[in-house]
Image: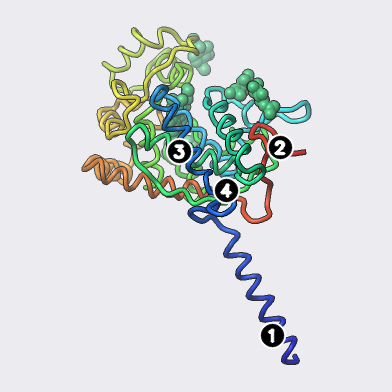
Amino acid sequence: MGRQSYFKALIICLMALLGSSQAQLQLGFYAKSCPNAEKIIFNYVADHIPNAPSLAAALLRLHFHDCFVNGCDGSVLVNSTQNNQAEKDSIPNVTLRGFGFIDTIKSLIEAECPGVVSCADILALTARDSIQTIGGPYWNVPTGRRDGLISRAADPLVSLPAPFHNLTVQLTLFGNNGLDVNDLVVLAGAHTIGVAHCSTISTRLYNFTGKGDTDPSLDSEYATNLKTLKCKNINDVTTLVELDPGSHDTFDLDYYKQVVKRRGLFQSDAALLTSSTTRSIITTQLQSTEGFFAQFAKSMEKMGRIKVKVGTEGEIRKQCARVNS
Ligand code: HEM
Ligand SMILES: *[C@@H]1O[C@H](CO)[C@@H](O)[C@H](O)[C@H]1NC(C)=O
Ligand SMILES: *[C@@H]1O[C@H](CO)[C@@H](O)[C@H](O)[C@H]1NC(C)=O
Ligand SMILES: *[C@@H]1O[C@H](CO)[C@@H](O)[C@H](O)[C@H]1NC(C)=O
Ligand SMILES: CC(=O)N[C@H]1CO[C@H](CO)[C@@H](O)[C@@H]1O
């Protein structure tokens, strides 16, 4: 190889390296291309979440559902079309909320710098800022995610944990996304906020083994309360139950306190008591709110990196509910 072509090759290698180092998430990815983006999101959240704190839970869950299905690529935000049933129209979605909130923030950002900031990043930042606004943990959100082109109704059923999943299944689904048992127990701590529909626990309350029975792993006093005051029959699909009764808008340790009292709402919550590893991770969280927040922040940052699309992959959607055509 001649000296010149040697240098040419070297330069090409260096450029490739540079290219690949740019093609990953970084803090403040939009600092030059849309310097106000993160501020616009933060201000909108700070203006609106205090009046509607329950939306913080919805937005966090939306980010989780986005990341677990085809990676954090905004695919959860896409509307179905004549030719495509999107993730939104799949069973686990039925109760997702907050789409309008994201769409509004997207339009504010598009007005400032069109075609620059991805919906996946907007969702990740909005979830983080919403939780911070209700007094929960703060975590780093490196940005640079690109929006996916695909959103299929069949995928959430396969990728997302369900309320009736045991620990083994939950660990597998988290493992598929590079998350471990610690991440599972820590992120399940998100159930310290928000609500669930009676449909998610009707079998647990009324027909656990198909004999009209109640799941014996659920505290019996709590089960009775739920049946007499909340989910009054097996066909009730609309009534809402707090995941963490009494403090469903407060991000605290109460979820873990409920779980150890056998009052976790879902079988998936109760399942966290079925191994000594998960029990000991719960005990660790219960030692301090600061400790839990720090771990939650770490696991959220990890979750936010699941199978992200970067560089020239995917696209920057113009509207979050529609793939560009
Ligand atoms: C570990 C497996 C998990 C299962 C089986 C699960 C399941 C569920 C179910 C069934 C609901 C109730 C939906 C409804 O009926 O409206 C729910 C709500 C919620 N989940 Fe999870 N989840 C899991 C993990 C997570 C994670 C990792 C997060 C976030 C980091 C999260 C955040 C939430 C929040 C905030 C709500 C309340 C939503 C609202 O108030 O609208 N969950 N979850
Ligand atoms: C967990 O659930 C899966 C799927 O239903 C089942 O195959 C497995 O045996 C269960 N594991 C345990 C430990 O119960
Ligand atoms: C309870 O489960 C059994 C077995 O799956 C089913 O045959 C029965 O119809 C269920 N009962 C109700 C009230 O849904
Ligand atoms: C997506 O669907 C929602 C609810 O039906 C609707 O309000 C919104 O305008 C749609 N957005 C797009 C871009 O089609
Ligand atoms: C929020 C949302 O898009 N919900 C949809 C979930 O899927 C069902 C059909 O399975 C639709 O009817 C809901 O509108």
Residue type marked 4 = Cys
Per the image, the residue denoted by label 2 is 323
| Residue 322 spot, x, y in % from top left | 69, 33
Mark toward the start of the polypeptide (1 vs 3): 1
Mark toward the start of the polypeptide (1 vs 2): 1
- Ligand 5: give its quadrant: top right
Q: Do we see residue 24 in this rendering? A: yes
How far apart marks 1 and 2 lie (CA) works out to 42 Å
Per the image, the residue denoted by label 4 is 34
How far apart marks 1 and 3 lie (CA) works out to 47 Å
Mark toward the start of the polypeptide (4 vs 2): 4
* Mark toward the viewer: 3 or 2: 3
How far apart marks 4 and 2 lie (CA) works out to 21 Å
Per the image, the residue denoted by label 3 is 42
Q: Residue farthest to the bottom?
A: 2
| Disc 4 + disc 3, Cβ < 8 Å | no
| SS assignment at label 4 | loop
How far apart marks 1 and 4 lie (CA) works out to 36 Å
Q: Is residue 139 left or right of residue 22?
A: left
Mark toward the start of the polypeptide (4 vs 3): 4
